[in-house]
Image: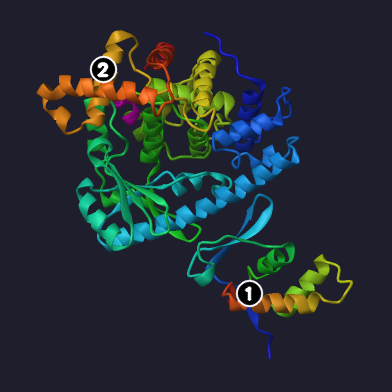
């Protein structure tokens, strides 16, 4: 069975403000409405990956090409971030 | 008259020009103190607009932190006002009231980074001024509260949104000038129909805005209105630069020029556009909307306005920089009279009286009494709210600015 692919919802936009990546809710964003969420590099990287449909495995593979993973935590970290993005409706199944 | 700008002012102008025009070099620091440049940019609410170049200056850690914080705060406010505009417009349109968003996000969308343009409120123009009470009822029913009703004098109401942001609901394009035929022209010309409004899609918001001819006229009249009062700062000139730094359809430029001529505002158009080309990075070659030919600023369809000399542009820019030198106009800067001398002073005094007492001043018989009330109020405010400023200083400053206006008009063959 093909792995599930995810894509960003249209309820948020990713912007670069003052050298920092921020996520801005533009639709129905629940508790995040009227806020501007500063992202660390990893979050911003993962959200950028989901600009087109991607599976978690594909994002992990892209991250391995970009970042070092001395402690072997990359896969776990990306899986957790993906779950959080899903729960906050920032990404959805493509 | 020769005007000399400080090294910080020159540096700031160069940073603005460099931000809008990749061909403008800004490598010479002119010995300017970076902290003062930042301070001046902050007073003019444009530090975020020139952030990419400003961050390259030798700023202290505190200044850098202040700049970063100003950028984030401006962006945050931009989004709050963008979504407030979107939601308010939706509420009004659902109630059958058609409005146009003035400036704000519609101008911000022209900037390289829209979020860097500072706004303090949402300005909406009613397509039909007769809708003002219906619009008020709709807003009140949606949790907005009327903060200030300046409808009779200045044709707008100020509303507070449920999350405490300010919305100004306008019934005219700009507040009245001291010229009835000009006011009448603007108000008649700008009676709006559905075809006069286009939709702008920006960051998830769908906003009703002007086409480019009306947008240009509104930007210019807004500057002109402020100029004849306490003046305006560099932010409005930045708006003018980004507005023209793109390809506009000649038909819109043509309509705009016709309107400017009807408003007898060619001298003002010439001085703002010439200053923007000379010092603020407005592009002027044939690949853009405007270009220079035989001492004229031209567009594809013909002549746009006159290209004024450096001295008059510097004098004008010096006035613009002074207008917001401390983040707000100096107390002595109240008005600039269009005509110098006693005649200009009397005309301006009458105009201010009419603005202050729009209903009572309709009866000519009441005017002597209203003039007296105005005088008492003026003298009292000079002592209290304006911090003991001398009436003589205010009049001197007004006269000085009206002489500058005269020089601008004199330097223009087609005022």
Q: Quadrant of residue B199?
A: bottom left
Is residue B120 shown left or right of residue B196? Answer: right
- Which residue is disc 2 drawn over? B347
Q: Main secondary structure of the magenta part?
A: helix
The percent coordinates of residue B219 (x first, y second) are 41, 36
Q: Residue at x 67, y 65 (%)?
A: A48
Magenta-tinted stretch: B259-263
Q: Nearer the viewer, residue B105 or A54?
A: B105
Q: How many marks?
A: 2
Q: Quadrant of residue B2?
A: top right
- The disc at residue A85 is 1
The correct choice, above or below, for B63 with respect to A66 in the image is above
Q: Residue at x 69, y 85 (%)?
A: A3
Callout 1: residue from which chain?
A
**How busy is the neighbourhood of tag 2: few (under 14 within 10 Å), some, or many (20 plus)?**
some
Of badges 2 and 1, nearer the viewer stands: 2
- The disc at residue B228 is none
Q: Residue at x 52, y 19 (%)?
A: B313
């Amino acid at each position: 069975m093909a792995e599930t692919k995810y894509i960003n919802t249209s309820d948020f936009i990713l912007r670069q403000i003052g050298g920092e990546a921020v996520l801005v809710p533009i639709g129905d964003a629940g508790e995040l409405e009227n806020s501007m969420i500063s992202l660390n590099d990893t979050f911003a990287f993962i959200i950028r990956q989901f600009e087109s449909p991607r599976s978690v495995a594909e994002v992990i593979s892209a991250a391995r090409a970009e970042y070092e993973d001395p402690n072997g935590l990359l896969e776990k970290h990306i899986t957790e971030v993906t779950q959080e993005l899903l729960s906050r409706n920032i990404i959805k199944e493509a | 008259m020769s005007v000399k700008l400080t090294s910080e002012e020159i540096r700031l102008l160069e940073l603005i020009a460099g931000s809008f025009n990749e061909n403008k070099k800004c490598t010479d620091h002119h010995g300017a103190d970076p902290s003062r440049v930042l301070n001046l940019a902050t007073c003019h609410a444009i530090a975020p607009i020139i952030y990419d170049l400003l961050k390259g200056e030798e700023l202290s850690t505190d200044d850098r932190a202040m700049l970063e914080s100003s950028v984030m705060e401006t962006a945050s406010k931009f989004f709050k006002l963008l979504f407030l505009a979107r939601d308010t417009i939706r509420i009004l349109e659902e109630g059958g009231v058609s409005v146009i968003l003035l400036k704000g996000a519609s101008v911000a969308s022209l900037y390289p980074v829209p979020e860097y343009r500072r706004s303090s409120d949402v300005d909406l123009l009613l397509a039909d001024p007769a809708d003002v009470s219906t619009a008020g009822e709709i807003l009140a029913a949606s949790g907005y509260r009327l903060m200030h009703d300046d409808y009779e004098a200045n044709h707008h109401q100020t509303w507070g949104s449920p999350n405490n942001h300010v919305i100004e609901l306008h019934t005219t394009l700009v507040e009245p000038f001291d010229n009835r035929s000009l006011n009448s022209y603007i108000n008649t010309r700008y009676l709006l129909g559905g075809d006069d409004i286009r939709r702008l899609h920006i960051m998830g918001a769908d906003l009703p805005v002007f086409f480019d001819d009306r947008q240009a006229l509104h930007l210019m009249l807004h500057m002109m209105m402020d100029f004849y009062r306490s003046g305006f700062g560099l932010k409005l000139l930045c708006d003018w630069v980004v507005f023209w730094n793109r390809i506009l359809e000649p038909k819109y430029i043509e309509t705009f020029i016709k309107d400017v001529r009807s408003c007898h505002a060619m001298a003002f158009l010439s001085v703002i556009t010439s200053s923007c080309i000379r010092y603020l990075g407005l592009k002027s070659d044939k690949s853009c909307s405007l270009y220079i030919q035989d001492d004229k600023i031209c567009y594809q369809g013909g002549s746009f306005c006159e290209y004024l000399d450096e001295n008059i542009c510097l004098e004008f820019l010096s006035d613009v920089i002074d207008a917001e030198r401390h983040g707000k106009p100096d107390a002595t800067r109240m008005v600039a009279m269009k005509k110098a001398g006693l005649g200009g002073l009397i005309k301006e005094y009458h105009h201010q009286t009419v603005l202050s007492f729009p209903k009572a001043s309709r009866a000519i018989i009441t005017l002597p009494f209203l003039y007296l009330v105005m005088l008492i109020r003026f003298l009292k405010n000079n002592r209290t709210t304006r911090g003991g400023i001398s009436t003589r200083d205010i009049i001197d400053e007004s006269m000085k600015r009206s002489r500058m206006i005269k020089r601008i008009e004199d330097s223009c063959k087609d005022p």
